[in-house]
Amino acid sequence: MSTASTATIVAGPGDTVLKVYPGSLDRRTRAALEREQAALSAAAHVPAILRVDEIGTLPDGRTTLRMPRCDRSLAALTEPLPVADALLVGETVARALAAAHAAGVVHGSVTPGNVLLRPSGEPVVADFGVTLRRRFPRDPLYDLEFAAPETVRDQTMDERTDRYGLGAVLHLVLTGEPPHRAAVGEQPAVRIHRVLTEPVAPITRPDIPDELAALVGDLLSKDPERRPRNAEIQLGRLLGAVPPAIPLDLPDEPILVLEPSRPEQPPRGTATRKRKYGTAIGILAGFCAAAAVPWFLSTTNEGTKPPGPAGPRVSPVEITLSPPVDRGTFVELSWTSNAVLDYAVVLAGEDRQEPQVILVRRATHRRIEVRPGLRYCFLIQGMNPQGTYESRPQPIRGAVCKP
């Protein structure tokens, strides 16, 4: 059965992680995966491709991939990047795809979640190959807003759909929006129809070169044959012509929460850490540890209680989380506040030992993946220089949330 997310990331030995898939591989699929990885080794000289160090199997039969650890991705990006940063990301993705295609390997699902940052801050593309995507298919609505029309229509995955994915990533870093953003409450059939039939609106940002805006439009063409083959050359030329961005001082951001959890949690109210990033890609960097959240999903019959104050408050800040919209494999959240805050979504569920924290910056809506049939609680934390504030928790599926 398809799921919204078919693999779990867990801590591996040293500076590695294990990507754990929910089942085993038959002999033919295992051989296909090994051929795919062997072919990809021909592109090992390209640092923009995140390598797979080992294909393994857990004692219960589940398949694992061991790879270098990268805790951050573009998945949580909600604001446009400077043109130089956006071009750096796009040129990196384009070079990685070109090298893989030359080796005979298709990525199959180029999305912001597959564009990661190494600890050094360099962008890198992960999860090449279609073998595991076909063995463990996701829900058709997963990352629909970034999917090529032919992938949505009949699960086509080839070099042309990879080029569409490159265009979708460029669209995100240049506008802060996916090519087809989902509207809260929109029916799945309507979303799918938009992806299949509606053209992506042209990018009108005034500081973007016309050539770059045109390239993104061509990459996102409904006609696969119109998508440019040598985008890395064009992006490289544009990158060389744009002045580098000024290094920015940005708050850290939790992009990926690894399991099992850390043995110790930082104390509640820990201030957001900041540091300088000396490279253009530094704008994407974020913190990988979040303040502990002292609330949990309860299996008792106690009523819902509002959480206590998170720290000193200098003004009566309020955050109101609307009742979550349950879509089966994901939940749509939206909230409001009477103050300007940076937000984090806190998720507690029956399938995890401790809450997961996902920073969303200034966004006031978020789609969160969940497992069908399990109970969950959601909470919004808001942060500004004066303190940290919380909404009342909201449950789904009969969950009881308590502070």
Image: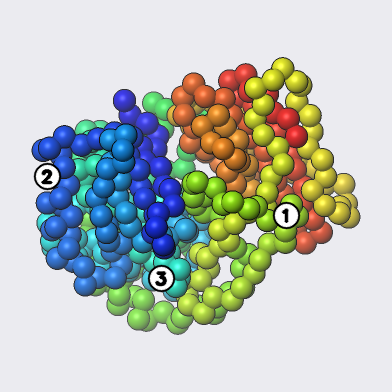
**Mark toward the viewer: 2 or 3:** 2
Q: Tell me the SS state at disc 2.
A: helix
- The numbered dot on residue 31 is 2
Against 46, residue 241 (above or below) is below
- Identified at 36% across, 37% down, the residue is 6
Instruction: State how far apart marks 2 and 3 are (Cα).
Output: 32 Å
Rendered-image quadrant of the C terminus: top right
Mark 2 to mark 1 CA distance (whole Å): 48 Å
The secondary element bearing badge 1 is classed as: loop
Which residue: 70% across, 37% down?
295
Label located before the other in sequence (2 or 3): 2
Please state which of residues 403 and 170 is positioned toward the viewer in this rendering: 403
The earlier-in-sequence mark between 2 and 1 is 2
- Within 10 Å of disc 1 (Cα), the crowding (few <14, some 14-19, many 20+) is few
Quarter-wise, where is residue 43 in the image?
A: bottom left
Q: Is 77 rendered above or below residue 85? A: above
Q: Which residue is found at the position 30% from the left and 77% from the top?
A: 237
Q: Which residue is mark 3?
A: 122
Nearer to us in this view, 310 or 199: 310
Locate residue 203, reporting x and y percent. Answer: 43, 57
Few, some or many residues within 10 Å of mark 3 (<14, 14–19, 20+) = some
